[in-house]
Image (cartoon, rainbow, N blue to C red):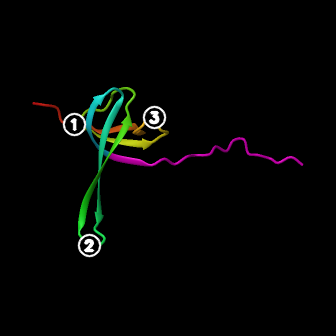
Amino acid sequence: MAEERPTTEQHTRHHQEKVGIVTSTKMQKTIVVEVHRRVQHPVYKRIVTKRSKFMAHDEHGNAHEGDMVRIVESRPLSKNKRWSLKEVLRAAPTGV
């Protein structure tokens, strides 16, 4: 007997998502996003803020410096770029 495989079932991948502030848009199709997270210090039990910078792919140049964006994990696109821009959550305030 042949094994029956469900043809309509699709395997959904759950990629990590992070929310952060765009700190640089000086590269073509690439943005640098800084993500802050608050964690408890293992010894002193104080809350400390840690930050990480991620390079993300921005195909259409939608993000600008100071914007709050959501990035999603993707395949490696270059040496340092493993994230893609999903959406701009809040635009940065423009100059006066």
The residue that appears at 9% across and 30% down in the rendered structure is 96
Q: Which mark is residue 92?
A: 1
* x 37%, y 26%: residue: 60
Q: Residue at x 37, y 31 (%)?
A: 58
The residue tagged 3 is 77
Tell me the number on the disc at residue 62: none
Bounds of the magenta segment: 1-19
Q: CA distance from mark 2 to mark 1?
A: 34 Å
Q: Amino acid at mark 1?
A: Ala
2 or 1: tag closer to the N-terminus:
2
**Which class describes the residues within 10 Å of circle 3: few (<14), some (14-19), or many (20+)?**
few
Crowd tier of the residue under label 2, counting other residues whose Cα lies within 10 Å: few below 14, some 14–19, many 20 or above: few
Q: Is residue 5 left or right of residue 27?
A: right
The location of residue 65, given as percent across then percent down, is: 24, 35
Instruction: Write down the residue under mark 2.
Output: 45
Predominant secondary structure in magenta? loop
Residue contact between numbered discs 2 and 3, judged by CB atoms under 8 Å: no
User: Where does the image place residue 57, in percent across and percent down from the top left?
Assistant: 39, 33
Q: Is residue 23 above or below residue 26?
A: below
Disc 1 secondary structure class: loop
